[in-house]
Image (cartoon, rainbow, N blue to C red):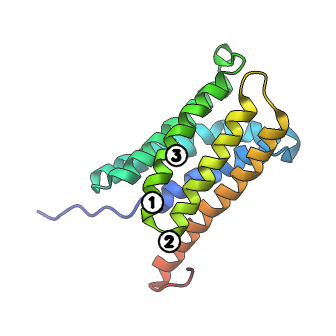
Amino acid sequence: MAELKIADPVPLGLAAFGVTLMMLSSANAGLWNGAGGAAVVGTSLFYGGIVLLLVGLLEFMRGNGFTATVFTSFGAFWLSVWYWLTTPAVQAKGSLGVFLLMFTIASFVMWICAIKLGTQLNALFFLLFVTLVLLTLGNWDAGNANMVKTGGYAGMLTAALALYLVAKSMINDVWGRKVLP
């Protein structure tokens, strides 16, 4: 019986995370005249949510506990964002701030783990932590639009790094050598 070989799902996970985060962050930064917020609704359900859950499950099958936890957790994060955006009954004042605080704490733990995984992943998780801190503060209680906007720009930087890691992984794999550092 032939052994089942599963391709590395990490680039897909980083792409789903990066694209979805870029869409929401650019909306938080005030770009697109409100269209970015509307565009992220479907993306957070399908690409950010479902795809990340699948990537996380594939990482579990490959025996990679850290990336399985990260991708599955952020798949659930994006599904929760979709639910919050589409369900007015859960949009109580400050509820988004509480939600973001819990993921800020989780991202801090992930960042501590990522420190050992190299400079680029360390930077990615640090930027993610900073983004979530800013968004938590910006969405706490009555909210602070300037803090949300700053969090949006930090999220765009985080997303850009995630998308760079996708490009690095795919380009280096396709070319069979180190093209991008």
From what the image shows, is residue 151 above or below residue 15? above
> Where's the C terminus, which quadrant?
bottom right
Write the residue at 47% across / 53% down. 112
**Residue 22 placed where, x, y %?**
69, 51
Q: Residue at x 32, y 55 (%)?
A: 64
The residue that disc 2 covers is 169
Tell me if residue 15 can be seen.
Answer: no
Q: Real-space Cα distance between discs 3 and 2?
A: 25 Å
Q: Earlier in the sequence, mark 3 or mark 1?
A: 1
Q: Which residue is mark 1?
A: 10
Relative image position of residue 110 (x, y in whole percent) = 47, 49
Alpha carbon of mark 3 to alpha carbon of mark 1: how far? 20 Å
What kind of residue is marked 1? Val
Left/right placement of residue 45 relative to residue 37 reads left
Numbered badge on residue 108: 3
**Residue 10 percent coordinates (x, y):** 45, 59
Q: Which residue appears at 63% of the width and 17% of the height?
A: 90
Q: Distance of mark 1 from mark 2, alpha carbons?
A: 9 Å
